[in-house]
Image (cartoon, rainbow, N blue to C red):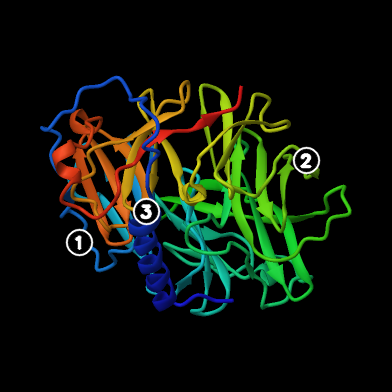
Amino acid sequence: MAKSLIEIFRLSLFLTTASVILLGCSKKSSNTLQAQYDTTGGTWQVDPSLYRLDKILLNGAVHGNDYTVAGLQTVSRFDTSSIAPSIELFFPTQLNLSTKPEYCGDFWAYGTYGGREAEYLFVPSTATLIGTDTTVRGGFYEWWFNMHDLDSSFSTDAVPSAIDYQFPVGAFNDLGQFFTCVLDSDGASLCLMDLNARKTLTVGYEPFIALSPVVKKIEPDVSDKFSGQTFLISSYKDNFFIAMGNNDYIIHSNGTARILPDILGRFYDMFNYNDTLYAMTEAAAIYRSTNNGENWTQFGSFSDPTFRNCRFFQVDSNMFFYVYSQIARIDLATGVYQEIDDRGLEYNEITSVNKFGRNVYVTTLSGLFYKPASKFLTYLPQSATASRSLKLLKGKVAIHR
C-alpha cells in the first residue's frame, strides 16, 4: 500500500509520458477565445530563491500577504516584502508521502507512510511553532500522530486513504474542521476532526499553535460499505466531499453524510466559480451545484477521458486548468479552452498555480517556476507548437443545456 519515492518518480514519468501521447484537442471545433496571440509572453523561469535541497513541490497556497509552498520535506513561506523565503522549515523525517498536502492558513496537513510510523503530519505555514497540549506525540516545528494515538479503536497500522500524491490527505472547511478518511484492517473510516487550534505566546514572543484534536467517526445513513482508497477529498464552505469506492458523498459539519445520487462517476477535482460549485469526474464530465453541493446537474464533458486529470484554478476573473505540464484558459460560458504560453514548463509536472504579488508561481515535482502576472494570459504562439512533441490544448467542452 505504501508508495516509495521511487514509485512516485515512476508514476510521474508515466504520467508525463502519457501527456505526450494522449493529450490532444478537438480539431473539429472552430471556436476560439477572443484574444490576440502575444509572442512577448516569455518563458517560465525557475525561481532560484528556494535554497532547499528538496525540489519535489507538492502544493502551494496564498493566504493574505503570504505564499507558502509545501515540499516533500520542507515548508517555505514568502511574503510580499521579500524575494526569498522569509522562513523555511525542514522536517528531517524519512517520509514516504502518499497524499497531497492540504492547507488551512496556519499549517499544512500531510499524510505519510513510513518514517516512524504511518501518520498524519501538521507543519506550520507561518513563523509559528506548532505542538500539542495533550499527551499525543508532537514537537516544535512539526506535529504528527498515528490515528491510534487519538482513538484506540484504530490500530497502529491505520493509514491515510488517499490513493497517491495527486489527491489531498483531507480538507478543512470554513469552520476550521478537518475531514479525512483512514484505512485500517477492518476497512475505511470517515473521520471529522475538531483540531481546537489556539495560539499562545512562547519564549521570545514567538506565536505557538497548540492543538487539542478530537476525532469523530462518521457513519453515513446509507447501506453502502466503505472499502478501498479515496480519490478526491474536498470542501466548500461548511460541507465536505469525498469520492470513495464507487460513490461520492457529502458530509456536513455536524457529521451527517449521504451518497450524492446525481453524480455519474467519482470526483477527481472540485472548484468554485461565481458562487457555483463544479466537479470533474473520472469520465471527464463536469457537474455543477448551486446549493453548496447538495444537488448536482451535469454541466458538460470533455471528449477525451484523460482530461479527468485536469486541475482547475482561478487567476483574477479568469478560469484555467492545468494537466501534467500544460496550462489552458477555459471560458465556462462557452466551454472553449485554449493553451496559454507555458514554454519553459515542458515535462515539469505541475502541482499548483497561484498568483502572488506581481508574479504567477507554479509548483512542480521538479521545482518552482514563475512569470510576471502581466504576461500570464498570453496564448502560445503557433510557431512554438511546431517544434515540440506536446499536442496543443485547444478545443471545446460539450456543454449540456
Does label 3 or label 1 sit earlier along the sequence? Answer: 1
Q: Residue furthest front?
A: 28
Does label 1 or label 2 sit earlier along the sequence? Answer: 1
Q: Residue furthest left?
A: 40
At label 1, the amino acid type is Tyr
Q: Is residue 383 above or below residue 54?
A: above
Dot 3: element? loop
Q: Which residue is mark 2?
A: 261
Q: Is residue 380 left or right of residue 232?
A: left
**Label 1 crowd bin: few (<14), some (14–19), many (20+), radius 10 Å:** few
Q: Which residue is mark 1?
A: 51
Q: Position of residue 238 (x, y in %)?
A: 66, 35
Dot 1: element? loop
How far apart, in angstroms, are the residues tagged by discs 3 and 2?
A: 30 Å
Name the mark nearer the viewer: 3 or 1: 3
Q: Are marks 3 and 1 in contact (CB under 8 Å)?
A: no
Q: Which residue is mark 3?
A: 324
Name the mark nearer the viewer: 1 or 2: 2
Dot 2: element? loop
Q: Position of residue 378 (x, y in %)?
A: 22, 31
Q: Is residue 238 left or right of residue 10?
A: right
Q: Position of residue 175 (x, y in %)?
A: 63, 37
At label 2, the amino acid type is Pro
The dot on residue 386 is: none
Q: Are marks 1 and 2 in contact (CB under 8 Å)?
A: no
Q: Is residue 121 above or below residue 184?
A: above
Dividing the image into 4 quarters, which one contains the C terminus?
top right
